[in-house]
Amino acid sequence: MKNILSVLFAILLFSSCNNKEQKRYVPDSSGQINNLVVVADNLLWENSVGEAIRDVLAAPVEGLSKEEPQFSMSQMPTKVFSGFARQNRTVLKIEKGKEAGTQIATNAFARPQTMVVVSGQTNEEIIEQIKKNAPKIIDVFKKTEITERQRRTSKSLFNDTQIREKLGVSLKFPTAYRIAKTEDAFFWIRKDIATGNVDLLLYEVPMTSIRKGDSAVIDIVRVRDSVGKTHIEGAAEKTYMGTEDAFTPFISEVIVDNKSAYETRGLWDLKNAFMSGPFINYAVEDKVNNRYIIIEGYVFAPSIAKRDYMFELESIVKSIAIQ
């Protein structure tokens, strides 16, 4: 009997220890949105490897009036990457002298955390890995930051009942915003900031309003200019929002709410006045209701950085759910 009890005790003890290992404590991650820690020895950071990293991850954000890097980066040598330094939410780690490869680790030292490890025997192999996997590296970091931005937004959500009832669309945005104007199924949503405003437009157009292929960007600009002239008037007479003629918008095909969509980035201006700024426009295909849902974010904030405001708007747009 004693032997049986001893065996049972040993099994319970082993099971308990095993569960403790599986439930390993991982601290909360930290860091500002779009701030990336690069773990690389100083010599690598200061030579061609560092240049390749900066070329990829500090490349300018598309559609801004002034150049701003996609990610703000801070570098630390491998030997000091320990303790609190490991808790940053996004980490790029460079390992020289190992087999060439690019690996993605999740919640290795903190939660949530995304760490991309790029390795190679030589500088040339590391640079090749960075360039070859640039889209994947950018995408995984950006998705991590979108999720974090949405998590912060979820702490204080605006009641979107009015939008759901009129447009059949759910949208998660903070209570810092307000619905400034609504006409039929058109919504103008605004947030005041110290130097201007951060705004959203939400409305629907018939499926026939936007043609596929090369004509899509022409139709999207035409639609947004028409809506701007009708709904977004300036303080002075005969002023209204349009698309800046001198700047060719960037357009790409993306997926939003598991639906095909066009993403268009460019510059808006106030016609017959002197106001402008960046916009990001999504035309989301809603085949069930034979329409496009148009959701656009734009910023007016003269003389200050706009990257993070535009990123906040992008995170809100990507929370959309068409009912």
Image: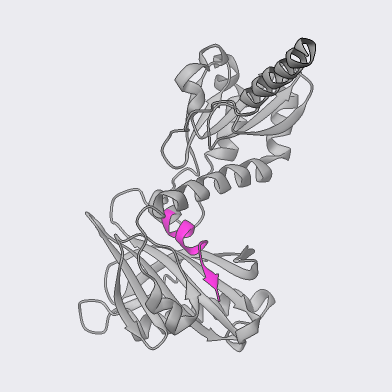
User: Which quadrant is the C terminus positioned in?
Assistant: bottom right
The part of the chain drawn in magenta is: 312-323
Splitting the image into 4 quarters, where does residue 105 fall? Answer: top right
Q: Nearer the viewer, residue 272 or 221?
A: 221
Q: Nearer the viewer, residue 180 or 63?
A: 180
**Is 184 drawn above or below residue 2 in the view shown?**
below
Using the image, determine if residue 77 lies above or below residue 183. above
The reply to whether residue 235 is in sight is: yes
Q: Is residue 100 left or right of residue 145?
A: right
**Residue 97 in view here:** no
Quadrant including the N terminus: top right
State left or right for residue 21 relative to residue 297.
Answer: right
| Residue lying at 77% horizontally and 15% vertically, measured from the top left | 7
- Residue 224 vs residue 292: left or right? left
| Above or below, 44 relative to 168 | above
Residue 99 position, x and y percent, is 79, 21
* Residue 8 percent coordinates (x, y): 74, 19
- Please name whichever residue, 16 or 266, is drawn nearer the observer in this view of the structure: 16
64 to the left or right of 128: left
Please give the count of numbered marks on the rendered protein. 0
Q: Based on the picture, tell me whether residue 321 belongs to the magenta stretch.
A: yes
Q: Position of residue 70 (x, y in %)?
A: 50, 44
Q: Which picture quadrant has residue 50?
A: top right
- Within the magenta stretch, is there residue 2? no
Residue 194 is situated, as x and y percent measured from the top left of the image, at 21, 54
